[in-house]
Image (tube, rainbow, N blue to C red):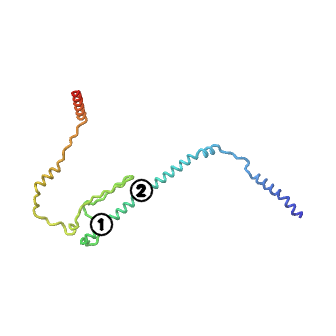
Amino acid sequence: MAHDNITLLTTAHDAIAAKKRAKHAQIKEIVFDDDARRTFLTGFHKRKTARREEAKKKAQLREKQERLETRREHRRALAERSARNAAEVERACGAFAEVDGDDWAGVSSEPEGMEAEYEGEEQLATVTVVQDFDLTTLLHGPPPTRGPVPAVDKGEEVKRARRKKTPKVKYETKAARRTEQRRQRARRTEKAERAR
């Protein structure tokens, strides 16, 4: 039991020795860099606003990319739709078959169905020139010319002439309007004086 008693009594010495070793390993002095401390403590708002600005820039860039992507998708969809429409027209023509199997390149002169795109920063405008056409004319050629065209009734010509005439609006200049206003004001005051 004596052995157990000695170990029991000396355990406190081990704890004290461990504390001394920890004390020796400790840093002797802590020195603050006042400038670094001040910039850290006063920079919270600055860093927060910088994070906000960075997030805002990223969001704007993301929105711009999305807008560009939707424009690309829209243009791609328009191109696909026009290709489908052209294929349907060719199928409807039926008798308009290719002899050598080459794809039809279109009309050699400037087409009236021309499509032009004008793109701004936030808007995309597509302008399409539409031409009315008749499939029978494409398939069978132009219709034969007829005899002399019957004369149109003179009553209809008179009606057309009457419809086309629009009254010409005459605008007064600024000086003419002022003189007219002065005349009218003078007449009103003159009438008011007579009525008294």
Residue underneath mark 1 = 86
Q: Kindly state the secondary structure of the residue where label 1 is placed.
A: helix
Q: Nearer the viewer, residue 1 or 73?
A: 1
Q: Which amino acid does label 1 sit on?
A: Ala
Q: Nearer the viewer, residue 196 or 100?
A: 196
Q: Which amino acid does label 2 sit on?
A: Arg
The numbered mark at residue 67 is: 2
- Where, quadrant-wise, is the N terminus in this rendering? bottom right
Q: Do the residues labelled 1 and 2 touch (CB within 8 Å)?
A: no
Q: Is residue 136 above or below residue 14?
A: below
Residue plotted at (51% across, 52% down): 55
Q: In this view, does 38 lie above or below 74?
A: above
Residue 100 position in % (x across, y down): 27, 72
Residue 117 position in % (x across, y down): 33, 56
Instruction: Classify residue 188 as left or right of residue 6.
Output: left
Residue at the extreme right of the image, as rendered: 2
Q: Nearer the viewer, residue 160 or 104?
A: 160
Dot 2, crowdedness within 10 Å: few (<14), some or many (≥20)? Answer: some
